Amino acid sequence: MKRSIYFTMLLVIVTSVYGYGQYTFQDCYDAYNQENAPFNQGDKASLDGINYEAKYWVDTPPPGEAWSNSGACGDASGVIGPEFAGKRRVIGYMPTWQEEYDFSTYDPSKISHVIVSFLDFKAVDIGDVYDNMDYTSNDFVSEIKFSEKSVKDVDSVLTHSSTNLLSVSRAANTKVMVAIGGAIDYGFLWLMNKYYDDDQKITQIAQLMVDYVESRGLDGIDLDMECWWVDSNVNKTVEDGGRLRGSNFGGEDQGPHVAGIGITRLAKKIKELKPDILLSSVVFGTAWYGNNYDEEMADYLDWIGIFTYDFTGSWNETPFGPHGALRKLPLDTYTHQSADNPIYSGEEVLEYWMGIAAPVWNHDGGFDIERNKLCIGAPFYGYDFSTKKPNGGNGYEFERYADIVAKYPDAPTSYDPKSPGAFNGNINQNGEDIYYETPMRIREKMKFVYDYGHQGIIIWELTQDLNPEHQHSLLKHIADENEIQCANAGLSCDASLSVDTFDEVIKEVKLFFSNNAIHYDFSLLQNNPSSIEIFDLTGRKIKSEEIKSNKGSFSFNTTTGIYVVKGTNVSKLIHVY
């Protein structure tokens, strides 16, 4: 069977000029040199891509209380790394517990990766009963194996006749992964705490994960370390939040949590056991829990998905406002919002993870993860700030996007006028005050990751959306915008072609359009195509041309639209404007 090759090309008949946002930084001050110490008030120096100004006499290097951060400086690629080079990834999570979800509506063609969630070691509040519920005991996890319930649940989603997620995804060339851990798997946290420096145990845990992936024919693993908080069900009494990683006061960096180090060592071991595996991790966006992670994990991961949501809503003292904002929000705009109780945004979180954020009380600027490793988050749910969680739960009522639209059909276009860009969703009717993702904001997020060089978007989670063919489906809008932005960037836009193989393919095949003619050059192909055919998107053939040599051209008079050009051993999606 001959392999078809795909890439996307933008054909411009009418020239347009687009303005895109980019990370651009000021020129750097003279490099910091300890030999020039001490520094006086107003003296300037740059260090590690950040400009600093001395606030008063100081003889120690920045950052610290004596230095003010003037922002990132120099060439953006030198500070935060190169841009992601390919079509942006759309990574959708599929939970095991949504029994009412209609799997016949699952459309893997709109995503690049699906991650079934979760395999766990000891998730304590989903109906499982354990003899030992004491997190502080030496055998809280007595045997390194996944819980039987989680294995059964994940397997059911992958292969049950009512779901067929694995086979349906395979047919669409969508990668299939499994998430391990989650917000209630204290067993995973316990294992990483206890065995982070035990190579034998780390190897055993990694082998368990690799064996599961190989036995099911999956593509990869998502390491999901979340539960840093107190849970009285497991006698856990220490809140692993607010951890100091340096500060604007010059506080000593406590380094990553030992469980964060464990994740890095686990990721490294998994890659050693199976180098071709896809491996990712999700992390909290802000420093409160984010400081627990170890930035060296990025060396072994294909991407890091950031929770750029739950900025509001999930705790009792929360401000009332957007929980998944993309752009920075002015202070004192929303109820309970203040400098001490801020509403964060995707912009600020990305700056923190790239290490260009302004230092605050618990971090000195953030991590140093290159932008091309980072994916931002899209929540397919909202929070209703009129209703507290039941039974004394922490925070406010959670609502699925589909349920919000069912109650309020105008919700997809009901925007919060107080937010920058006015694309954050807000319904304030019938005594309810709901903030949520909108089709417009999801498109802005996709534009953002293209404009600023990030790898893609993670979705929590797919079952909370409308039918993906619905005009207001969030997934439909994110997929449509991905195609538009990919084409505008002149990238390979077919989901079946991975970024890793694009450079190889582009060397083999060249095809471009000018003056109403198709020009082709297949000189590097081993087998020349015998013909080229042009179809519209309904499948109707527009033109067919016999190809007698590996280089040439033929006329192609057409109207504005999208066409598919196919030939023996080649298929290309052509956008004609």
Image (spheres, grey):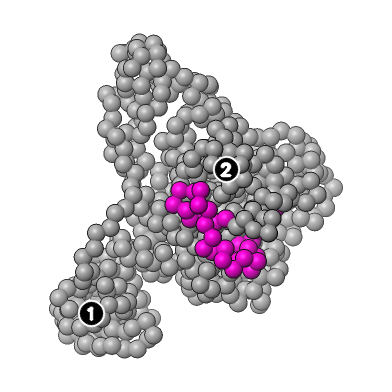
> Residue 400 magenta-drawn?
yes
Q: Is residue 421 above or below residue 570?
A: above
Where is 434 relative to 317, above or below? below
Q: Is residue 538 left or right of residue 431?
A: left
Q: Which three-letter amino acid code belongs to the residue tagged 2?
A: Tyr
Q: Which of these two is toward me, 193 or 216?
A: 193
Residue underneath mark 2:
334
Q: Nearer the viewer, residue 21 or 454?
A: 21
Q: Can the viewer see residue 510?
A: no
Was residue 202 drawn as part of the magenta stretch in this picture?
A: no
Q: Residue at x 47, y 66 (%)?
A: 477
Task: Assign the C terminus to one quadrant of the image.
Answer: bottom left
Q: Pinpoint residue 175: horizontal percent, then vertical percent.
A: 50, 65
At 80% across and 44% down in the image, what residue appears? 233
Q: Which residues are magenta?
A: 397-426
**Secondary-structure class at tag 1:** loop
Instruction: Write down the residue under mark 1.
Output: 528
